Amino acid sequence: MRPGRLEAFSDGVLAIIITIMVLELRVPEGHRLSDLVHTTGVGLLTYLLSFVYVGIYWNTHHHMFHLVRRVNGGVLWANLALLFCLSLVPFTTTWVSESRFEQIPVVIYGLNLLSAAVAYLVLQRVIIRQQGPESPLRRAVGADRKGKISVVFDVIGILSALTIDRGGRVGVWIALACFVAIVIMWVVPDRRIDRVVRQYGTSG
């Protein structure tokens, strides 16, 4: 089958995920800036981080499927696995926010991000296997160092939160720094797929 329905479904799910996250933000009881900072400040920061994460997945997913002409059952299930992981982001984001960055919520948030990163790599591998060794996606991603580095940073963040300064916050802040570093790495435009899309479009 053609990937149009898969892309439309995925876009809808990601839009709902973002909507749920913003609905979880608490409205300040007062009307001063201090009320906003006290009531919603942490929530806005975690929402911003998770929003950019989900936005990056939407962006990379959109670009990736520009190089896919047909999908099979394996691709559909791998895509659903990715969407399942991302659908948990509103829950873990809210928990981190309401706990004000306590250790266990941050660890679970990191595990959520790690599961999404692994699911994305699996989806990518399933597509490449379906398309064959000369697939356009394979040429575009190459060794996919950014994807693998993201997984490593997630693991480092989770382990830091679990093992470093367990009675304090040093490990938690290292973990959050790792998660932010991943966002910064992916926000920088990646032209690999764009180049192959142009080549594929002219030759296909």
Image (tube, grey):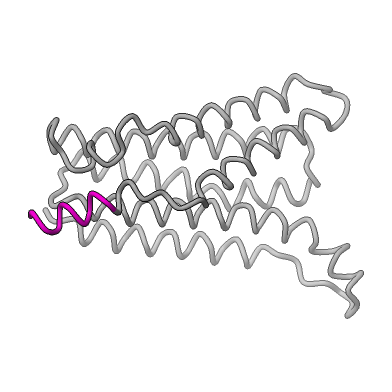
Q: Nearer the viewer, residue 201 or 91?
A: 201
Q: Is the magenta stretch mostly helix, strand or loop?
A: helix
Position of 17 with respect to 158 (left or right) is left
Name the one closer to the observer, 53 or 30.
Answer: 53
Residue located at (47% from left, 64% from top): 16
203 is within the stretch colored magenta: yes
Whether residue 13 is situated above or below residue 110 in the rendered picture? below
Residue depicted at x 45% and y 36%: 146
- Hey, which residue is sitting farthest top in the picture? 163
Q: Position of residue 117 (x, y in %)?
A: 46, 37
Residue 44 image offset from top left, x and y in percent: 72, 61
Along the horizontal axis of the image, is 136 left or right of 102? left
Q: Look at the picture and state if 23 lies above or below 59.
A: below
Q: Where is residue 62 in the image (x, y as percent from the top left)?
A: 33, 57
Number of numbered tags placed on the structure image: 0
For the C terminus, the image quarter is bottom left
Side of 122 relative to 50 (left or right) = left
Image-quadrant location for residue 81? top left
Residue at image x 15%, y 43%?
72
Image quadrant in which you'd find residue 181: top right
- Judging depth in this view, the residue of 4 and 180 nearest the camera is 180
Residues in magenta, as a range: 195-204
Residue 159 position (above or below residue 46)? above
Indicate yes or no whether the magenta region holds residue 26: no
Residue drawn at (62%, 25%) of the image: 156
Residue at the extreme left of the image, as rendered: 204
- Residue 156 appears left or right of 69: right
- In the image, residue 175 above or below residue 89: above
The percent position of residue 40, horizontal first and vertical second, equals 79, 64
